[in-house]
Image (cartoon, grey):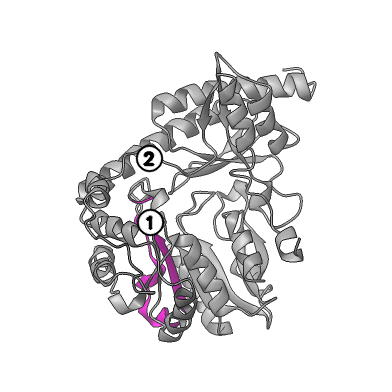
Amino acid sequence: MSNRISAFQCSPIRRLSPYARDAQTRGIKVYYLNIGQPDIKTPPQVIEAVRTYDQTIIAYGNSEGRQDLREALPAYYASYGLEVKSDDILITTGGSEALQFAFMTLCDPYDEVIIPEPYYTNVSSFAHSAMVTIVPVTSKIEDGFSLPDISEFEKRITRKTGAILLCSPNNPTGHVYTEDELLQLLNLVKKHDIFLIVDEVYREFCYDGKQFTSVLAFPEFADRVICVDSFSKRYSMCGSRIGALVSKNPDVLANALKLAQARLCPPEIEQVAARAALKTDNSYLLEVKAEYEKRRNFIVEGLQKIDGVVCNAPKGAFYLVAELPVDNAEAFATFMLKDFSLDGQTVMVAPCEDFYETEGLGRKQVRIAYVLNTEDLKQALKCFDAGLKAYRTQVLGQTL
């Protein structure tokens, strides 16, 4: 096998799935809190657009994406007060492809991208594919995973640095970067003539009355900004794999288009579905946001009542990172699937060690996706609490 593929990690979000399938085969109900797959229904007009697709040939489309979809997106961005033109948008096969396009457009092999850790673990695979080195700056649970001091970013900038990458609202921490935090980074990338890439896939989901600030809201820095977007979470259509790379830098788009042409075109029928999603009444998104905020409040309150568990109330997205009173979160997560059940039920979570680049960090942490309704979360919390007690007594030999 290649050295490149050997450096890839198996996804901590999915690699325990065989244990979950085995548990289900044994008749155990598994509450999946490991993956950001919402149980909220996709808007009906999206499903209808797929059902009524009437072309007799599913033909190649434009490499930059369907024109009607690109022309519809500026109105969506305008609802956030952002001036985006259709020519600023490249449709991609999910936000994942947009991130990979950004890496390959901005960086040569062995160039570096600076990123706050913990970060979305699949970014590591995108970086390895592009032969890009991830350089971490550690954010801490005791600080609510807020932006580390800007000096920590600057001291890591070298002649090989191509960009700084953020996710806001953040996966996995739920932190939402403030206008001041973004401005600090924008001034830094301008000073050092590099780029700021921001994954804004969860922008709809900001809580406690807080407003979202987009990296596209700073026209004076537009030439060094790339925004990554996706339909997956916003409209609960994760399997559609439609995203976007947005930039006002024409050189970025022209060169990213070379990659888009090499993969021919994004999925055709899914783009039709995405175009239909943009017709969704705003009440849908408001209701979904309110539902996630309710779920957040419920699970944070429940987790904070469990002995030894440390977690903050995330400001956005639908994830949180919790620190557990265990030696190894992956061993605990495996135990929950292989060796534990409560009334025929158990829970699957994602161990956090591989969400960090720095060796040894996150070993006692898990990412939890609160994408299930509160009744399911109630049962999941019971299992989690009982499983944690069982692990500590049976495996660690602790006396509780």
Residue 372 seen in this snapshot? yes
Residue indicated by mark 2 = 292
| Left or right for 124, reference 245 | right
Q: Residue at x 80, y 21 (%)?
A: 397
Furthest toward the front, the residue is: 56
Q: Residue at x 41, y 40 (%)?
A: 38
| Left or right for 239, reference 54 | right
Q: Residue at x 76, y 65 (%)?
A: 3
Amino acid type, callout 2: Tyr
Labels 1 and 2: the sequence-earlier one: 1
Distance (Cα) linking label 1 and label 2: 13 Å
Give the quadrant of residue 191.
bottom right
Please give the label number shown on residue 203. Answer: 1
Q: Tell me where residue 331 appears, x and y as whole percent.
A: 72, 34
- SS label for mark 1: loop
Q: Tell me where residue 123 appears, x and y as whole percent.
A: 58, 60
Q: Which residues are magenta?
A: 211-234
- SS label for mark 2: helix
All told, the count of numbered labels is 2
Amino acid type, callout 1: Arg
Q: Is residue 400 above or below residue 110?
A: above
Most foreground residue, 231 or 323: 231
Residue 306 seen in this snapshot? no
The C terminus, quarter of image: top right
